[in-house]
Image (spheres, rainbow, N blue to C red):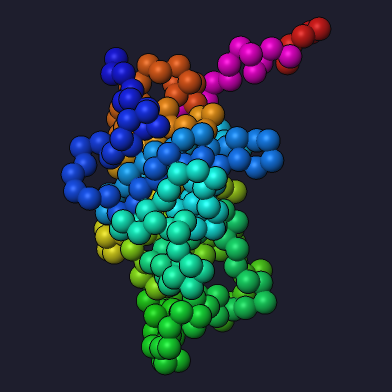
Amino acid sequence: MMASRPSASEGTGSPPGGNGKPIIELIDVHKSFARHNVLRGVNLSLLKGQTTVIIGESGVGKSVVLKHIVGLLRPDRGEVHYHGQHIGAMKRRDLADLRVNFGFLFQMGALFDSLTVAENIAFPIVEHSRQSAQNIEQTVAEKLRMVGLDGIQEKRPADLSGGQRKRVALARAIALDPEVVLYDEPTTGLDPIRADVINELILKLKRETGATGIVVTHDMASANKVADRIVMLYEGKFIFDGTPREIAETDEPIVRRFVEGRASDEELKGLYQGS
């Protein structure tokens, strides 16, 4: 059975089989909230055009990693680079300009309930460009076609199913043709069929736009389908870094239990006491 790769936090964090200069680098990143140490020296290098999936238990800090990448959080120690630029050292204006290169699909979609679908998707275009109303309308229709929903422009989020809201949120995330798309739990709250639609959309966007993808999830079916590379965060560090095939074959106990969805004896200890 194939052993897992060295921990990304202990090595270079380089993509498996990857060559070339990383588009994004996290270098010895530490982050604490009050007395809770969430990230404890995270190293990760991401190559252009690859989809990297970050897995791990709930509350382990996966979304915290995403927020560092787009500068919503700054490390207590360490650095985050985008094309060699030190994000943590940027001024607010420069950081705002940089974020145009990123699309962010939030866990619950984060659509504006008071706006129509078209207005939701147009929002980042209006905020960050001076396109004409006609060009914006065409872009909105194009992005909705990409997610298979053209024709619902005048509906509001409340009129949509959960899967449709996720797809509209994804259309908004790619409205500015970002170089990097970050997906925070993209299949949460969806049944397996709707979740697979989102997985297919992630693959489609990679094929059609060449965008670099970073996906946070605890859904192993989704991870295995969309990932070029999977990294696992545990107790503030990456303890696995490899391909979907390698994680399926790993004999590292913590990773193995997560992949199989098995609780440890310690986690089950109090469940049957006195029974």
Q: Is residue 263 magenta?
A: yes
Percent across and percent down for residue 137 are 44, 86
Q: Is residue 1 magenta?
A: no
Q: Relative to 120, is 28 above or below?
A: above
Do we see residue 13 in this rendering?
A: yes
What residue lies at 65% left-to-right and 42% top-to-bottom? 33
Do we see residue 118 in this rendering?
A: no
Give the quarter of the figure containing the N terminus.
top left
Relative to the observer, which residue lies in front, 256 or 98? 98
Residue at the extreme left:
19
Percent across and percent down for residue 82 are 35, 57
The magenta segment = 259-270
Residue 172 placement, left or right of 212: right
Q: Relative to 93, is 61 above or below?
A: above
Residue 210 placement, left or right of 191: left
What residue lies at 41% left-to-right and 50% top-to-bottom? 80
Percent across and percent down for residue 53 are 40, 42
Relative to the observer, which residue lies in front, 252 or 26? 26
Q: Relative to 73, is 10 above or below?
A: above
Percent across and percent down for residue 141 are 41, 79
Residue at the extreme right:
274
What residue lies at 21% left-to-right and 42% top-to-bottom? 18
Q: Identify the image quadrant of residue 61.
A: top right
